[in-house]
């Protein structure tokens, strides 16, 4: 494990973004939602790495890619404790835990099959709430139902 | 309230609900005032609901407004595949206010975002039906003289009933004590009970209707439908337990009233109809006054 970690560290990037502290079980979901499985730039992925704080974690490094705020919101929904590290000329210029916004637009589907957003061409809009277990749940502006973290599908 | 849409009961404050009830009281005394002459009310019923539609149309007509619209989606351009956006924008050109009923949840909120004129939600799927809640509040206040500190008993399907959920939430603002009578399978869901608990209000749960009647100020009846049961044998066991008859009302309080959102099937025996405690037909009539109050407030005439 320490070998992999070393290697990831060694393969530092000149310009780009590192997403660290992703729970191991959602690494590939993060890849998919950010469409990193489709881009032609180098992407390094590590998963099932040991972390004292997070248990098994994953890490993604993307060359020459700087995420837009909507993309960061997507990361925050799937991996609320992930850290975003922006690198320019081999230097860390930004390092911060991702933050969930108060509201989410466009990219999550409402779980309610009878919600109008699933029938008409309407941008979804949700308020971000938390369950007693501190999991994210999204309150649909239209049908007023909650979409739980486990039920989230992305548009 | 001028030019504002009413989609969910929460769109208006408690003070505004009270104001609507006060205006409705004036209309009850004098319902035929042609103060909306020259105004056009569109009633768009994407699914049929004769009772609600007639109540709105009667309210508008007594006030002198013209009513346009359709009574179900099959007879309108919607059937030809027109989007909700286009229907709402088109109708907005011809009307001053839109009253709409739609089978999909969230449709009314969406319409209110699209429409340049105000929208009143007359039911969006299982979500909201705020004018029903207002007419229930009106009926309770009228018969009890107050909305505060009452013992309200809800009977029947407390799990799926949108009407019950909205009214419970509304009554949490008035220090009610709740008596919840239902079969085990149709109890009030925890996300509604949460509102009662947050306000630290009292509630009691029963499976036997007779136990709850003596302490009630209001007995709010709803229908127990067979389709709601996962096990048909369970339904057979309880189907007669939530039917009210005249003899059961003997120990009821003097001023107690029986409410029901209508239409009823068999959950209130017809022998109750002539009992002075029966209030469900007047309750429906109150809907006209409440809708008059809403139309005139939103159109800025009251
Ligand atoms: Zn929805």
Image (cartoon, helix red, strand yellow):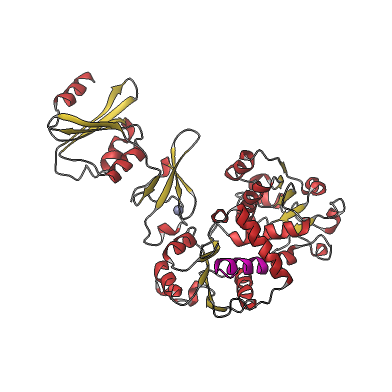
Instruction: Name the main secondary structure of what is drawn in magenta.
Output: helix
Answer with the quarter of the image where residue B201 lies.
top right
Answer with the quarter of the image where residue B139 lies.
bottom right
Report whether residue B30 is seen: yes
Does B288 lie within the magenta span?
A: yes
Count of marks placed on residues: 0
Q: Nearer the viewer, residue A153 or B179?
A: B179
Identify the magenta region: B287-301
Q: Quadrant of the N terminus of chain B?
A: bottom right
Left of A70 or right of it: where is B230?
right
Q: How far across and down, in percent of the image, does residue B25 sit? A: 71, 65
Q: Which of A77 and A91 is in front in this view?
A: A91
Q: How far across and down, in percent of the image, does residue B181 sit? A: 72, 47
Answer with the quarter of the image where residue B59 lies.
bottom right
What residue is at 40 percent from the left and 67 percent from the top? B85
Q: Which of B67 and A30 is in front in this view?
A: B67
Q: In which quarter of the image is the C terminus of chain B?
A: bottom right
Does A144 lie within the magenta span?
A: no
Q: Quick check: B286 above or below B241?
A: below
What residue is at 78 percent from the left and 51 percent from the top? B217
What residue is at 55 percent from the left and 69 percent from the top? B299
């Amino acid at each position: 494990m320490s070998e992999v970690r070393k290697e990831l560290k060694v393969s530092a990037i000149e310009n780009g973004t590192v997403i660290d502290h992703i729970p191991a079980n959602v690494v590939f979901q993060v890849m998919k939602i950010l469409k990193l499985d489709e881009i032609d730039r180098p992407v390094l992925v590590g998963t099932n790495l040991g972390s004292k704080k997070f248990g098994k974690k994953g890490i993604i490094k993307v060359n020459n890619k700087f995420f837009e705020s909507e993309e960061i919101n997507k990361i925050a929904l799937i991996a609320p404790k992930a850290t975003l590290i922006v690198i320019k000329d081999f230097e860390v210029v930004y390092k911060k835990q991702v933050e969930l916004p108060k509201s989410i637009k466009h990219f999550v589907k409402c779980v309610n099959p009878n919600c109008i957003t699933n029938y008409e061409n309407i941008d979804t809009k949700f308020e971000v709430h938390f369950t007693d277990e501190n999991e994210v749940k999204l309150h649909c502006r239209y049908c007023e139902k909650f979409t739980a973290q486990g039920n989230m599908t992305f548009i | 309230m001028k030019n504002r849409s009413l989609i969910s009961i929460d769109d208006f404050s408690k003070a505004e609900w009270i104001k609507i009830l006060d205006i409705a009281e004036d209309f009850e005394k004098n319902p035929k005032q042609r103060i909306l002459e020259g105004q056009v009310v569109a009633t768009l019923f994407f699914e049929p609901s004769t009772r609600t539609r007639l109540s709105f149309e009667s309210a508008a007509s007594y006030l002198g407004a013209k009513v346009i619209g359709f009574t179900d989606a099959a007879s309108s351009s919607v059937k030809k595949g027109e989007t909700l956006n286009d229907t709402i924008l088109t109708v907005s050109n011809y009307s001053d206010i839109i009253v709409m009923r739609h089978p999909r949840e969230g449709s009314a909120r969406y319409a209110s975002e699209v429409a340049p004129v105000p929208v009143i939600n007359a039911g969006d799927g299982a979500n909201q039906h705020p004018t029903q809640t207002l007419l229930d509040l009106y009926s309770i206040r009228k018969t009890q003289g107050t909305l505060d500190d009452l013992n309200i008993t809800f009977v029947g399907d407390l799990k799926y009933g949108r009407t019950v959920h909205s009214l419970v939430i509304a009554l949490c603002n008035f220090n009610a004590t709740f008596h919840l009578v239902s079969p085990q399978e149709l109890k009030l869901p925890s996300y509604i009970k949460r509102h009662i608990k947050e306000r630290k209000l009292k509630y009691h749960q029963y499976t036997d209707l007779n136990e709850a009647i003596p302490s009630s100020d209001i007995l709010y009846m709803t229908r127990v439908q067979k389709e709601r049961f996962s096990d048909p044998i369970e339904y057979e066991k309880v189907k007669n337990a939530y039917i009210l008859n005249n003899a059961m009302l003997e120990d009821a309080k003097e001023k107690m009233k029986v409410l029901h959102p209508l239409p009823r099937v068999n959950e209130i025996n017809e022998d109750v109809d002539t009992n002075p405690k029966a209030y469900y037909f007047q309750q429906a009539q109150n809907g006209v006054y409440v809708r008059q109050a809403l139309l005139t407030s939103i159109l800025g005439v009251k």
